[in-house]
Image (tube, rainbow, N blue to C red):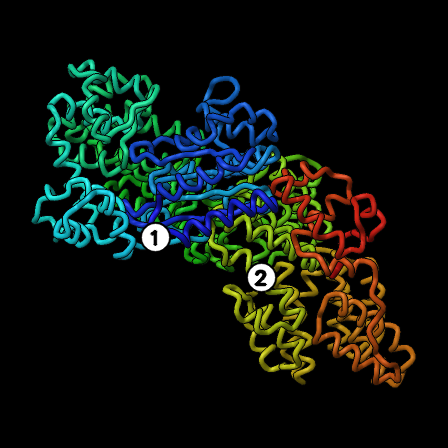
Amino acid sequence: MLYGRNDEQARISSLLAGARDEGRSGALLLRGEAGIGKSALLDHAAELASGDAGTRVLRVTGIEVESGIAFAGINQLLWPVRDRLAGLPGPQAAALNAALSGSGPSGDLPAARDRFTTGLGVLTLLADLAEDGPVLCLVDDAQWLDGATAEALLFAARRLAAEAVVMLFAARDDAFTGTGLPELPLQRLGRDDAVRFLAEHGLSRDARDRILHDADGNPLALREFGMAGDRLPDGSRPLPVADRVVARFQSRIDELPEKTRLMLLIAAAEGRGYMPSLLSAAREMGVGLEDLEQAERDGLVEVSGRSIAFRHPLIRAAVYQGAVAACRISVHQALASSSEDADCRARHRASAALGPDEDVAVDLQDAAERARKRTGYVTAARLYQQAADLTPARDAQAARLRAAANMMLQAGRPDEAEHLAARAGTLTDEPAELARLGRVRAVVEYERGNRRTAARMMVEHSAYAEPDDKAAMLRTGATYAWTAGETPALLRAAEALPGDAMVGGLAHLAGDDLARGVPLLAALVAEARTSTPEPRAAAGPEDAAGLALVLGDDEAALELAAVEAARCRLNGLIGALPGVLRTQAQAQVATGLHADAEATLIEAISLACDTGLPSGDWRLSAVFARVAAVEGDESRLREMPERSDGALGLLELGLGRYDDALRHLESVHHRYSADAMLAVADLVEVAVRAGQPERARAPFDRFRAWADAVQQPWASAIALRCEALLDDSEDAYAQAVRLHEKATRPFEKARTELLYGEWLRRARRRSDARTPLRSAMEVFERLRAKPWLDRARAELRATGESGSASTPTAPVLLDRLTPQELQVVRLAAEGISSREIAAQLFLSRRTVEYHLYKAYPKLGISSRKELSRLALEPSTT
């Protein structure tokens, strides 16, 4: 019976009922100190689930000594259902097979893959199991899960929706933090509940009151102290409750026979409860299973089948901490010699080491490499760090710490990577190694948003790198420099890496040499459209889609970003996808596909959160800035962590605040890219409206040179619009409108039509003005560009027409859908099955069908068959 946990039990019951009765999924993290009753609540949940016919219960308990074994927890949790892996999509099945067996189909360790594919496999497997009935996953002592398991389980838990899966985690107060899961903190029992708890022990009033004081409401302490009763010694009260409980356990252990204590120590040092390894070491030390009999009768351990488990982790802590160092070392040596598992052998050898030992360090490095190949990057980093601590030579120690730092970067932990790199830097003065460490620190700075610093660091350190490292560092440094507007670093990179088309092309653009820069980059884009390169680890200007955006080639950008996104989805490359989706969203925003861009970005942000990246990642949030500016949403734009002066200038222009707009737009960094050039075009309009056209002449010359070089119809149309503004020329306006008809970028087309309509009205040609003004108004209305729509309506009214709203078109129905519903509906309309959609969007089949179920009424339909009758092509809403 549980005392004082009515609210917690009700919360758990509600989650289970939601899964059973409504197919809802849910996750909850129980948090509290040792002995507070977390495991008891998990047991309660298991009992409730066992009472529901068809509910499957899967359990895993984090084991401290297994925290350095990649996917040890996944093996515990999913071993009973490993036969279901064959039904998963290929990349997910491969990832889970590698996690469960440590090898691929051939028996060899698999090549490194995206570390989040395993988590996706867990989600899909749990959803598949739930097809037969609700699934309850219980994760105890989550603070001791290995990093790879924790990452996989949290990814699955964050993406639960409508699968009828419940995941309950239990963790200590000060660990397993930043999970993103709802938490339920467990408080100590009040006096009345504690008294009821102790009633079964038949204590005297004095003993009861002393125990109530010493236990302080901790259920485990109440139990252990209650069992001791009047025999509980005084003098322990100044200690924390957990330490008092450990002291109580140690006093019980001290009363056991010597051989029993040794057998307990072997079990505590082995840690996993794996009987064959434990008994082999025990024989070497002259003890055996029979020596556990007294400890088993005393309730300290539980022996079942081929395993042994301590009743509570604090018992194991009491056994291990209470043994003298020499005895612990002897036990680890025996376990190392008897272990058939290379990772366990390395761990025990390390625990027995009395000082630096290169042979042991090599074993740990080998274990780290095995973890790396299974995408257990946190585990690999810890093993490399441990290997470094046992490495005698300082340069080799620095190299292993640098490897640990790289693994932390792979795991998405830049702060820990920086700390390790800093440690390594104090141990070596070897130039090539310092260059590698500089590379780590530069990546850390970039991840923090310090792009200029990152660019300078990457390029500077490349000068001392080995040839194989140097080219990669220069390419990365060049892209950092381009995104940051750090032209000197970009030019240095190009000088140090002659012949590289991407670096050279960007450098030529930064150096005002459009004639050489544009053809180099355009050739790379054209080559990418006719080839099938392997997917990159991240998206940016180094990718063809990013280069297409730089050149304003919207058609190529949309095509290449879609291809790259599809490739990432097919191969389960979840970690790379947020960056790829960011590039895709930029292309969608540019071409006026705002609803699609919003869906794309929301998926990117969701994946970033679910993979442990910051939700406010500047690279993602910045894409929203242009949309907010177009819509005139000032509060939204100013709240964004990353907003460019170009976006702020467009906002002020739309709101008619020309002086502020001029200030923002004139501060936009001089760079020949589509984004920067749009800001130049905006500057021309602002300067003319502010009555200072002379301030726009030089910027316009830059824009016209760029438009002539890239030869994109939309850019040429805007150049004509700017010319019309500066020269008050109807012919330029008319040419611009005609050119826009075969160009992308509807927002720019509508702006040109608005300006032309204004010009015609001022020329008293009201009838002629109405056509471009009506066209502009319709586009602004679809784009929700309120400030611009208001201007168009006012101009249309000035011509004598009402300026009323246009008739809603079929695609407007899509406005009623959430971004994820929109994604699902579009794919379903193409005839893609729910299971295939789930694989593409990294969801479960049930969640896909739930979104369809919610979308149909909003669209006025009732089945998939009716989707084909709707206008579901990408829209500009």
Counting from the top left corner in percent of width and height, residue 525 is at 67, 45
Picture layout, residue 326 above or below residue 664 = above
What label does residue 4 carry, if any?
A: 1
Counting from the top left corner in percent of width and height, residue 233 is at 9, 44
Relative horizontal placement of residue 778, taking residue 477 as reference (left or right) = right
CA–CA distance in space, label 2 to label 1: 65 Å
Picture layout, residue 817 above or below residue 654 = above
What label does residue 671 carry, if any?
A: 2
Counting from the top left corner in percent of width and height, residue 170 is at 38, 44
Q: Is residue 499 visible?
A: no
Q: Nearer the viewer, residue 130 or 85?
A: 130
Q: Can you name the residue that lies furthest to the right here? A: 767
Which residue occupies 60% across, 51% down? Answer: 603
On the rendered image, what quadrant is the C terminus found in? bottom right
Q: Secondary structure at mark 2?
A: loop
Q: Secondary structure at mark 1?
A: loop
Quadrant of residue 337 within the rendered picture: top left
Quadrant of residue 227 within the rendered picture: top left
Counting from the top left corner in percent of width and height, residue 437 is at 34, 44
